[in-house]
Amino acid sequence: MLLIEAGDRVLAAFPPTLSKRASRSLESLGVTPLVNHLVTDLDTEGVVVQSGEHEERIPAKTIIWAAGVLAASIAGRLAQAAGGKTDAVGRIIVEPDLTVEGHPEVIAIGDMVKVRSEPPFPGVAPVAMQMGRYAAKLVRARLRGETIGDFAYHDKGKPGDDRSRAGGRRPAGADTAERLRRVGHVAADPPLVPDRVPEPPARVPALGDQLPHARPRRALDHGRRALAVKPDRKLVQKRLRASRTPL
């Protein structure tokens, strides 16, 4: 099984370390990633791929097309009407101030645009929101006869991403903290139960029952941040005793 990727790595939207890990996981499943290969044609007998100047036909009876999404068709119509250009997925190329080439009075924003000389921005709501705020500032500045700088996207990170606390950058040790969060969202200080092993409870207290009584504290400092929760031991022991039932 081949996974054909036009870019230089899989999961290009994520850090390179995660891309390498994903490639290893795919290979362990019998999947061979072919990066830097662009599909130029396909039919019922296979696909044609191109890597640099080299073109190759790969026979295949089963082809799964997962090339992502295209920009809204209005982007192409706007580019055609304005004499502009579009990229490979149909986004209209705009200037650094989000105006259409040759038409400074036309501002285009959202995932239908590709800013010239910038890598494609992710197609998420924060990008469009920041573009909208910038467009409003640009219009107000023009009405006052002033100018403002070019649009700059600030990646504030996703929920659980350390970039949201580091001004859009991944701090040193962020991958370590991310792994810790993936292993377990809550780290609890032992011992939580009496010295002897209790009888099997009829209902194990859920973490959600403990969290309202938990005291958060900072852990993994010096650029590494995670949430460590210190439950109330007496409350946990009381609930364990109350939930026990004889075998």
Image (spheres, rainbow, N blue to C red):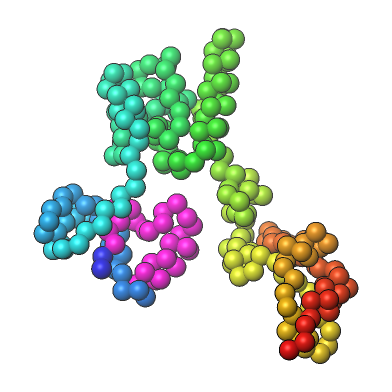
| Residue 89 figure quarter | top left
- Relative to 243, is 24 on the left or the right? left
- In-front residue for pair 151/24: 24
- In-front residue for pair 163/195: 195
Number of marks in picture: 0
Residue plotted at (31% across, 18% down): 82
Against 238, is 195 above or below? Answer: below
Residue plotted at (62% across, 55% down): 160
Residue 162 screen position, x and y as percent: 62, 54
What's the magenta region? 3-27
Residue plotted at (66% across, 49% down): 165
Against 230, is 46 above or below? Answer: above
Asked if the stretch drawn in magenta spans residue 4, the answer is: yes
Residue 131 screen position, x and y as percent: 52, 30
- Relative to 23, is 81 on the left or the right? left
Q: Quadrant of the N terminus?
A: bottom left
Against 7, is 26 above or below? Answer: below
Q: Quadrant of the C terminus?
A: bottom right
Asked if the stretch drawn in magenta spans residue 7, the answer is: yes
Residue 26 screen position, x and y as percent: 36, 69
Visible in this render: residue 53? no
Visible in this render: residue 205? yes
- Furthest residue in direction left, as rendered: 45
- Furthest residue in direction right, as rendered: 234
Residue 24 screen position, x and y as percent: 39, 71
- Relative to 115, is 237 on the left or the right? right
| Residue 74 figure quarter | top left
